[in-house]
Image (cartoon, rainbow, N blue to C red):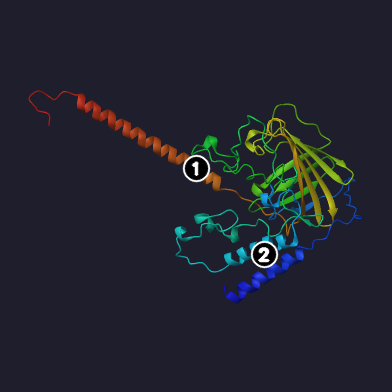
Amino acid sequence: MSKKFSAMLLGAAISALAASAGAAPADAAYKAPLNAYGQPDLEGTWTNATLTVLERPKEYGTRKVMTAEEVKKVEGDDAKMYAADAAPRDPKVKTTDLPHECGKGFSGAGCGYNAAWIDPGNTIMRVNGEPRTSFITDPADGRLPPYKPGVTVPNMYMRAHYGENPENQTLAERCLTSFGYSAGPVMLPLLYNNNYEIAQSKDTVAIVVEMVHDVRMIRIGGKHRTDGDRPWMGDSIGWYEGPTLVVETTNFPEATALRGAWKELKVTERFTRVGPNRILYQFKAEDPTMWDRPWSGEYEFTPSKGRIFEYACHEGNYALEGILSGARADEAAAAEKAKAAVANKTAAATPAPSGTKKQ
C-alpha cells in the first residue's frame, strides 16, 4: 500500500469519525412504529460495536460524558492504528520482532490477530447524542461495585482455561455459547461479531446473536421456571411497558456467570426504540450475595450494515479432538513404559541358568 493511499485512508476515517461526533439526540416527538400485534417494533439487525467499555477508565472519575477533545483523541488514535495496520508487512518478520503492545489488548505474537479479523467498532458510544465514558452509569464512578466481604473474586469462568481435559473446557471453547458476554444478559460487545437480529411474535422475542449463533428466547407474559433447570443464557421472560420491551432474566448456570454472579443473579433489561435507527438498551444487574449493591447502565444499538452471516465455529471441536488424541497417546506411551519397567524388573530378579555367569 502506498503512503499516499494510507494517508487517504486515514483522512477518510477521521472525516467519518468527525461526522459521527455530531450524532443527533433523541427526537422527543418520535413514536416507535408498532408491529402487527400492536407491540413496539424492534425488529431488524443491530450492532453494539463501539470503543466505549463496560467499566469507566479511572481517569474520567464520575464524568459519564466525554469532551469533544477526548472523543477526537480516542477515535483519532483508533483510526491511526487501523491505518498503520493496513500498511504492508514483512512476511519474514518473527513474532519476537513484533511490538510489545499493538492495540486492542494485543501484544507480541498476538499482534498477528490484525484488523482484517476484528470488528470491535471505531467510535465512542453515544446515548442521546452524548459520547459516553462507559456503559455503567450507576454507581457514579461507572465501575462495578465492591464484592461482598468473604466473596472470592471470580476467576472469569467463561474466559479461564482449566486445563487439557475435555470435561473442563469452557462452553466457548466447545463452540456451544458465545465468548464473554456477547449473548448476555448483560449483552456486551466483543472484539468482533457484534451483530444481533431481533424477531418478534405475539408471545416471543428471539434475539439471534452473531457470535456462535446463539439465540436468546424471551417469553412474553411468561413466568420463571421452577423445575431447577438453568438455561445457558438464563431464563428470560418479558413484557411491554408502552414503547419499551422489559426483560427479566434469572436461573443462570455457573457456566455463564456474570462477573462471578449466577445463583442469585437477576438482570433486568429495557429495549426502547428512540429513533428510526436507534434502540436504547438499559440494564440492571442484582445479586445480593455477590455485590454490595446493584449496578446498571445503558448504551444504544444502531443498525448493522447487513444481515447476520453464519458463524461456523469449529476450532473448539478440533481442539477437543486433539486433546483426546493426545491423551490417548500419552496413556499408550505410559503403558508401554510401565510394561518395559516390569519386564526389566522381572529379568533382573530371574536367577541365571546353572553354569552361566551374569554379565
Of 341 and 309, the residue lying toward us:
341
Q: Is residue 57 visible?
A: no
Residue 335 image point, x, y percent: 35, 32
Q: Position of residue 135 (x, y in %)?
A: 73, 48
Above or below residue 286? Residue 308 is below
Q: Residue at x 40, y 38 (%)?
A: 330
Please name the amino acid that badge 2 sits on: Gly
Which residue lies under the disc numbered 1?
321
Residue at the farthest left position: 355
Q: Report if residue 336 is visible in the image.
A: yes
User: What residue sits 76% from the left and 62% below the top?
Assistant: 21
Q: Residue at x 26, y 29 (%)?
A: 343
The quarter of the picture where the N terminus appears is bottom right
- The residue closer to the viewer here, 182 or 213, is 182
Mark 2 neighbour class, 10 Å CA radius: few under 14, some 14 to 19, many 20 or more: many
Q: Quadrant of residue 124?
A: bottom right
Q: State the quadrant of the C terminus.
A: top left
Residue 319 left/right relative to 37 = left
The amino acid at mark 1 is Glu
Q: Is residue 201 left or right of residue 257?
A: right
Residue 352 vertical placement versus 144 (above, below) = above
Q: Is residue 173 above or below residue 83?
A: above
Mark 1 surroundings within 10 Å by alpha-carbon count, few (fewer than 14), some (14 through 19), many (20 or more): few
Question: Foreground: 190 or 233?
Answer: 190
- Which residue of the protein is positioned furthest toward the right in this rendering? 29
Which sits earlier in the primary sequence, circle 1 or circle 2? 2
Which residue matches tag 2? 76
Give SS at disc 2: helix
- Mark pair 1, 2: CA separation: 44 Å
x, y (%) of residue 130? 79, 56
